[in-house]
Image (cartoon, rainbow, N blue to C red):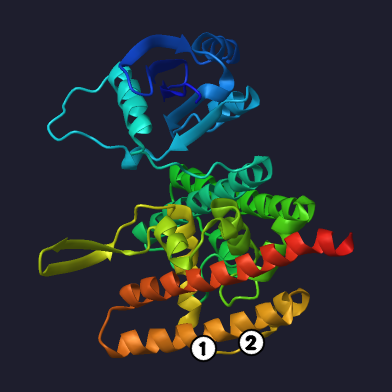
Amino acid sequence: MKHVRFVGLDVHAETIAVAVAEPAGEVRSLGVIPNRSEAIRKLVKKLGPAEELRVCYEAGPTGYVVYWELTRLGVKCEVVAPTLVPVKAGDRVKTDRRDALKLARSYRAGDLTAVWVPDAAHEALRDLVRAREAAKKDQLRARHRLGKFLLRHGRRPATTMNAWTQRHLTWVKTVHFAHAAQDVTLLDYLNEVEHMADRLARLERAIDDAVTAAPEPMRAVIEALQALRGIAQVSAVTIVAEVGTLSRFARPRQLMGYSGAVASEDTSGERTRRGGITKTGNAHLRRIVIEAAWAYQHRPSIGRALRQRQTTVTPEVKELAWKAQHRLHARYRHLTAKGKCRQEVVTAVSRELLGFIWAIGVKVETQTRRQPSAAA
């Protein structure tokens, strides 16, 4: 039987605190090493054969660089969820050394929950869609600054028009103030709004190019998810980038839990209390699915844009998407009739929408895996 050693790493930008737990022995600290490839290689060589090491560290801002480095060295490594690491009640002392010891001890006991580590293709796509999400937030802030500036000075268009259309921006450019300082302020706010629009368009073009260059299995799932109402290309790309392979979830409820859209619960004896959603999951996935769920307040129908998106998918996927429209719209009407507020209703609908996303993703991934063998 191999002598497996469990190693806990507390990873920071410049340093890594190291602790090791023997299979049935002590847990001890090995000090701090630089967060460099050479130092990691020396550590693996010092601790023994790579196949006898089990290493873990918490997910954080340093990403998965250490994970990829250890994997290349033949070491089994897991990145664990920080919020699910056991914490002793009343423990008020926190240091890098103690964190590494706690990780090693908990890893040996099997008390840690590993997170999914994306491959290179998924990580690149995730970086791009998150950059677009950040640009969208920055665009909203820039519009708010300009809009509130005009409102504060009582400047409104003479005729009714939709905000942030080309017509509205043309009107904004005709606004002038008595003081030059305010004209400079208006120009700066307007330039920022236009800059954010250009930035967003540039990122969306990059997403189009990334989807075209993506591996065939990933591209097939992105196309299939767009058969669902409320999920266009950006939403589908976000779901695939954040979740990865949908078939890694054995059941749709696991995907719902991964999104953090399941209800919290406090049960003791005969008392059962359920509250709001836990939000202990992927916030990017949860946001995009809740946004898509608003589309199911409308009666089932297939508009021109949705029909165009469904031209490349199989009849089985179309059938699932049509079934989703009927079920989720009925769910929306049922909960609304019970007096639930619209936000709660849409959250419940989004949870069931994840079930259809899982079903379509698993079906397409299964078909994609069978194609090479059928061709052979």
The circle on residue 191 is none
Name the residue tied to disc 2: 302
Place of residue 237 in the rendered image (x, y in percent of width and height, measured from the top left) = 63, 58
Q: Is residue 190 visible?
A: no
The residue under the point 59% across, 89% down is: 301
The local crowd at label 2, few if under 14, some if 14 to 19, many if 20 or more residues have their Cα within 10 Å, is some
Which image quarter is the C terminus in?
Answer: bottom right
Q: How many marks?
A: 2
Toward which corner of the image does residue 18 lie, by quadrant? top left
Q: Earlier in the sequence, mark 1 or mark 2?
A: 2
Q: Is residue 138 above or below residue 354?
A: above
**Closer to the camera in the image, 42 or 174:** 42
Side (left or right) of 170 relative to 5: right
Find disc 1 in the rendering and name its residue: 326
Kind of residue sitting beneath label 2 = Ile
Residue at 59% over, 50% down: 129
At a point 34% along the width and 13% down the height, the residue shown is: 29
Residue lying at the far right in this picture: please name it: 376
How many other residues sit within 10 Å of disc 1, few (<14), some (14-19) or many (≥20)?
A: some
**What is the x, y in percent for residue 15?**
44, 15
Residue 147 at x, y = what percent? 43, 59
Q: Position of residue 352 (x, y in %)?
A: 44, 74
